[in-house]
Amino acid sequence: MITRRSLLTAGSTTLATGLLGFSVPARAKGLAPTPTMRGGANNYRPGAPIVERIGGGGFWMSGTVRRAGDGAPLAGQRIQIWAHTTEGHERDQRSHGATLTDANGVFRLEMPQIVPAFGQAHGHLAYDSDAFETVFLRPVMRSSKDSALEAHFVLQPA
């Protein structure tokens, strides 16, 4: 007999089979894709090269890339990064570079210290390959003295 208690203890992955003759997922529909942020594409340069580091370094931009729906980590995804730094403006080619995600969908790229532009210290990141929809992010730092900034992508297949 199915009781309220047996339904609640059935677990978070599926409700009791037999209630309606089939299993019903008990979790949400899935992980929603990341929307493009306003201003994220400013000064974007298609095809920025994959680099070991941008400029002299000292600041770390990092994050993760996952697939919408199931949240699976996405390895080998190209993330472009650029910003206004102590070594150049975000328009400058030398302020742009790209990196690839590792097997766990993690990326990390060292770059010069980000400094305020238009009153805010912020970075720009883009996923711009063909397998998923393009996403531009523009995360703002809490303080211009921070030495790292994270941004996370959830990508929708193209």
Image: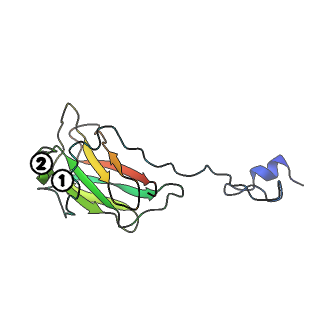
Residue 63: x and y in percent read: 35, 54
Q: Residue at x 50, y 48 (%)?
A: 32
Identify the residue at horizontal 33%, vertical 60% (top origin): 129
CA gap, disc 2 to disc 1? 7 Å
Q: Is residue 67 above or below residue 40?
A: below
Which quarter of the figure has residue 131?
A: bottom left
Residue where numbered disc 2 is placed: 92
| x and y, in percent, of residue 12 in the image | 67, 54
Q: Is residue 66 above or below residue 84?
A: below
Q: Residue furthest left?
A: 87
What is the crowding at mark 2: few (fewer than 14 residues within 10 Å), some, or many (at least 20)? Answer: some
Q: Is residue 63 left or right of residue 158?
A: left
Q: Where 74 sits versus 126, above or below?
A: below
Q: Does dot 1 land on a helix, a strand or a loop?
A: strand
- Please, what is the three-letter code of the amino acid marked with disc 1? His
Whether the residues at callouts 2 and 1 have beta carbons within 8 Å, the answer is: yes
Which image quarter is the N terminus in? bottom right
Looking at this view, is 124 or 38 the one in front? 38
Residue marked by disc 1: 96
Residue type at mark 2: give it: Asp
- Given residues 95 and 102, the one toward you in this image is 95
- For residue 25, the mark is none
How crowded pointer 1 is (Cα within 10 Å; few <14, some 14-19, many 20+) is rated as many
- Residue 76 at x, y percent in the picture: 35, 67
Instruction: Locate residue 47, reporting x and y percent.
Output: 22, 59
Residue at (21, 49) in percent of width and height: 82
Q: Nearer the viewer, residue 73 or 134?
A: 134
Q: Residue furthest right?
A: 1
